[in-house]
Amino acid sequence: MSKSYKISLVIFIVLGLFFGIFMAMQNSSIPRSGLSNISNPITFDVNATSTQNYINIPRGYELKYPPVLRVNDSNAENVVFSSSDAQNNLSVEIFDDSAGLSIADWWKKFQGSNASNFTLVGTKNIPAWYTGQLYRGESGSNENHFVFIKSGSIYDIHGDIGDDAFNKIIDTFNFPLGYSYPSLDGNYFLKLYFDLVSNNCRYRVIGSNNSLISINNIVDSDITSCGDNGDTFWYYFGGWGDGNKLLLPGNAGNISIIDVKALSSKIYKYDAKLYRFNGVDRSLKHWLFRKIGGGGYVLLDESGNMTLSHLPYTTALYDRVNDGFVLTNESSNSSGISTQMDFLPSESLSIRHVAITQPIRPPEHDCPEPSLSSKPGEIILQNGCLGNIDIKI
């Protein structure tokens, strides 16, 4: 073998080795920052008609996301949004913070040695409520983390969807204020919340799979009463009847009865000059109204005709568990205040006297409104400052 041939062979082998090392580095499965570098960030127009809305009922948060992502919320503590090709992912993870760590301390503990691969780029706000810290992955990575603390939990929203889309999703993340009322079969939820932007009380209807039920073509507005001026509609009833019928107060004298499954509606009318709506039984056959100006309550039928014209009570609550109205009066003497509780079953409409309490001296401060937590065959009334009444019927 000639000397020149040997030299050429050595050069060829060395070049081959360098080429092999180069290709191995290019195909390495170890990504920077522990994540793949995505060269295709998502484009997201929050106002587009195709934009999706996600609501996490167990944790009470909501956000908007682009339609190219699909949701997996089988674990409410780790909801994942991912594209069909798995190249873009967003997660909302919730961790226990019973140790009371700060965001910075939790971040160092959670990321460990990988924490140095992220840069703290600033803070962002969850609308009106929480301030969190925004971490961005090293150059070339689309990975972002937004971390904040709420009620003893650490929320870590993270994804490799691109800076712009990530920030826009964070801007839609919110914890709506208000209450959630399940339908009688549990398949739907009415959410009543206060909109901090418009300073209005609003509502929305959600299916059991977290889908938003659109009833905009049935009702004129998603703005409703906040319960001011003595309006006890939301407090006393919660808005549901049998067959997934949702009741919404509209203009004075009108109550919309919406079938949220069939997406149809009809109007129940009453004289708003004479009565204020109080509650209705689950069959929607018996409607209870308080007389304006005092004088107790009246009961109307499903057509608005008078059923019972004189119910001389100070308080009335509909008991959905036992399907009847709990009626109370108070009387006072030198020993304190006693409560008389009667029950009006929807089936018979025959008043039953069920309890009279011993006199109680109420404290000298405001008391909570009465409420029910009944069981079948047992009325349980939390009677404000006057104690609880628990009676079997």
Image (cartoon, grey):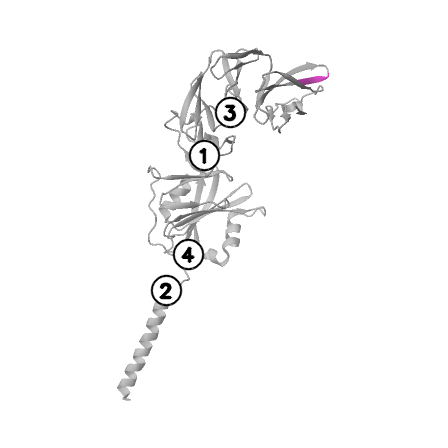
Marks 2 and 4 sit apart, C-alpha to C-alpha, by 14 Å
Position in image of residue 162 (x %, y %): 36, 49
Residue at image mark 4 = 35
Please identify, in this view, whether the residue under mark 3 or under mark 1 is nearer the observer. 1
Marks 3 and 1 sit apart, C-alpha to C-alpha, by 17 Å
Quarter of the C terminus within the rendering: top right
- 229, above or below 83, in the image: above
Q: Which mark is first along the chain, 3 or 4?
A: 4
Marks 4 and 1 sit apart, C-alpha to C-alpha, by 35 Å
Residue at image mark 1 = 206
Q: Which mark is first along the chain, 2 or 3?
A: 2
Determine whether the residue tagged by mark 2 lies in a helix, strand or loop. loop
Q: Residue at x 33, y 77 (%)?
A: 14
Which residue is at the far right?
Answer: 335
* Residue contact between numbered discs 2 and 4, judged by CB atoms under 8 Å: no
Determine whether the residue tagged by mark 1 lies in a helix, strand or loop. strand
Q: Amino acid at mark 2?
A: Asn
Position in image of residue 341 (x %, y %): 65, 19
Q: Is residue 332 left or right of residue 206?
A: right
Q: Amino acid at mark 3?
A: Trp
Please identify, in this view, whether the residue under mark 4 or under mark 1 is nearer the observer. 1
Residue 234, which numbered label?
3
Residue at image mark 2 = 27
Q: Residue at x 56, y 43 (%)?
A: 152
Q: Is residue 208 left or right of residue 378?
A: left
Q: Which mark is first along the chain, 1 or 2?
A: 2
Examine the structure image and report whether residue 338 is included in the region drawn in magenta.
yes
Q: Which mark is first along the chain, 4 or 2?
A: 2
